[in-house]
Image (tube, helix red, strand yellow):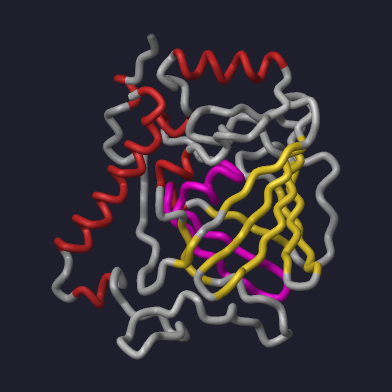
Amino acid sequence: MGSGLMALFYSMHICCRVIFGAALALPLAAQWVNYPTPGIPRTTDGKPNLSAPAPRTSDGKPDLSGVWEHLNSRTTAYYLDGIDIPWQPWSRALLDERTKNNQKDNPEGFCLPRGTPKADAFDLHKIVQTPGLIVVLYEYQSTFRQIFLDGRPLPKDPNPTWGGYSVGHWEGDTLVVESNGFNGKAWLSGRGNPVSDAMHLTERIHRRDFGHMDIELTINDPKAYTSPWKAELHPQLIPDTELMEFVCEENERDARHLVGK
């Protein structure tokens, strides 16, 4: 286990997707695992052209719709590595403790949600965009996120949740998303970077071209860190596939074996 626990969980899930697709390959189209996604620009040999211009909606906004994922799961599990994080003493001590204990208390080991923004860094997810609402569907645990674009403010006294509450607005071609209302139980990364219920997350999302997205994260959590700090995500479009149902709790037999040092 150790620091590779999350990468192991993810690799097992990818293997399940591959085995599932192969086992049900007749007819494969019925499973939508390798079904051509409508509207994707293609090269002369029929392959998706992920360098084509980013699509736009009927009102001229960039269209973020599609199935997205970071292709290197181990890298994205530790996407905060190399950042000079302004730790509060207790949060740094907690990260060290989680490392020493082989991450035995990792919420994912008990089939709990990954939370925001880790889910976007680590999950295959599908974005469905409308003028007033963006819905993000995550394959892991079949969870979802709503980003409201209808002008509503963030709730002032929200009931804390794993994914928080999100509102967004456009600044040119960049979607700016503000989120609060987190319960502080999720981890920021595969290494166990903690957060608190005071976290305010800002995401600046830009679809660079048809197949690539850039996301700048600003984490403002005064309980866990001494000042706001930034990180980046760079998901890629995964064409010609769809999400599969993923229920971690079904026949779960592993959590009892998670032990620390």
Residue 162 vs 39, above or below: the answer is above
**Image location of residue 154, percent across then percent down:** 81, 50
Q: Quadrant of the N terminus?
A: top left
Q: Which of the 4 image quarters holds residue 6? A: top left
Q: Nearer the viewer, residue 90 or 231?
A: 231
**Image location of residue 166, percent across then percent down:** 72, 53
Magenta run includes residue 150: no
Q: Nearer the viewer, residue 155 or 1?
A: 1
Q: Is residue 45 left or right of residue 80?
A: left
Magenta run includes residue 138: yes
Residue located at (40% from left, 41% from top): 74
Q: Is residue 62 left or right of residue 150?
A: left
Q: Is residue 59 left or right of residue 82?
A: right
Residue 76 vs 97, above or below: the answer is below
**Residue closest to the far bottom:** 44
Q: Is residue 44 left or right of residue 210?
A: left
Residue located at (55% from left, 43% from top): 118
Residue located at (48% from left, 58% from top): 125
Q: Quadrant of the C terminus?
A: top left
- Range of the magenta residues? 115-140
Residue located at (53% from left, 27% from top): 192
Q: Nearer the viewer, residue 28 or 45?
A: 45
